[in-house]
Image (cartoon, rainbow, N blue to C red):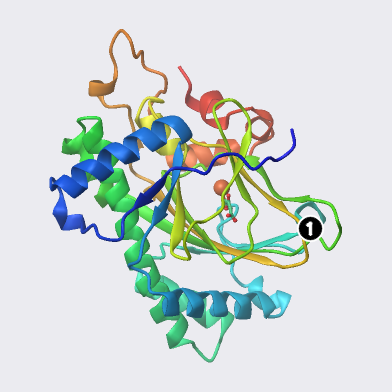
Amino acid sequence: MGSESFPKLPFLDFSKLELSSVGSPEWESLKSQVREALEEYGCFEASYDKIPSDLRNAFFGSMEEIFELPLETKMRNVSDIPYHGYIGNHPSVRLYESLGIDDVAVTEKVEAFANLMWPEGNPDFSKQTHSLVEQLSTLDMTVRKMIAESFGLQKYVDEHINSTGYLLRIMKYNSPNTTDTEVGVNSHTDKNSLTILHQNQVEGLEVQTKDGSWIKFQPSTPNSFIVIIADCLSAWLNGRLHSTYHRVMMSGNEARYSLGLFSFPKADYLIKVPEELVDEQHPLLFKPFYHKELLSFFYTEVGQAAPSALHAFCGV
Ligand SMILES: O=C(O)CCC(=O)C(=O)O
Ligand SMILES: [Fe+2]
């Protein structure tokens, strides 16, 4: 199926909203827009001005610096979890390179990453990352809180927030340098809870609609982010919101840089559909599971071959 430029994704403005404004008319209005957008698309564009442009630019500058470091330096960033360490320099991911910072809300983890990349230290990078993650995790919690409230699940909010881990991943897609379009990342759903992505001025991200066509993500403002439902949240909601298939298609001759904050349930948190979401019209769709088990399954041969690893792993 070719990529086509279809109507834009729903655009929601989070700039004026404070997390503390729960229950205000602005909160309630945005909450219903979040629910509506996610029911239709599983994602939306969020305008969010809490991350000033100088911070965004400085962080993208640091990202460029990191990707220019020698391969052996980038390869110091290792993780037992696939896609949490360094990926690149591999024929199957010709255009794609990425590095992950696990537990990125923990200051020492960011400093440890910075020390790997710059053995002489880089306090600026640690500060930038801290500010960025603080604001993006606030957006993540706001959206997840709105979702829970909209399904009458507010009693689970604290437990969810307290059992959340964050991975920050920075990505570079080299330009294909041909007149063709080339895959940067194949179509997939994310395996975490909620994903927030941001990119430089080079486009390439596409999301799939319910009818199977593809919408290009074309940010309306420089402070636009895309918020995407991933598998763990979809499963917890008994499939009432779906995790959206997305991919990156690269063309032209400019490199694309993007960053993603991925929230996920911590290792000891059992993802179990709340009883409030199961009734005759909505039979239980997913058995309880741990995030790590889903990830491990996803990277097996069977998991990779399954059209949906989530359904294959814990579908009832
Ligand atoms: O680079 C992007 O915008 C998308 C990356 C992505 O889908 C992922 O890392 O899961
Ligand atoms: Fe993704």
| Residue beneath the point at 52% across and 44% down | 8
Residue 52: % across, % down: 38, 74
- Vertical arrangement, residue 137 with respect to residue 276, above or below: below
Residue 96 image-quadrant placement: bottom right
Return the residue at label 1: 94
Q: Quadrant of residue 104?
A: bottom left
Which quadrant of the rendered structure holds the N terminus?
top right
Q: Secondary structure at mark 1?
A: loop
Residue 174 in the image: above or below residue 55 = above
Specify whether 146 is left or right of 38. Answer: left
- Number of numbered discs: 1
What amino acid type is highlighted by mark number 1?
Arg
Location of residue 202 in the rendering, given as x and y in whole percent from the top left corner:
64, 63
Query: Which residue is at a point 75% across and 59% down the rendered structure image?
Result: 95
- Res. 163 in view: no
In the rendered structure, the answer to whether residue 218 lies left or right of residue 149 reads right
Q: Position of residue 188 (x, y in %)?
A: 61, 40
Q: Nearer the viewer, residue 308 or 244?
A: 244
Q: Residues within 10 Å of mark 1 (few under 14, many from 20)?
A: some
Kindly identify the residue that appears in the image at 28 percent across and 12 percent down: 279
* Residue 296 image offset from top left, x and y in percent: 55, 40
The residue carrying mark 1 has its beta carbon less than 8 Å from ligand 1 = no
Quarter assignment of residue 43: top left
- The answer to whether residue 128 is left or right of residue 142 is right
Compare residues 219 and 98 and report the one nearer the observer.
219
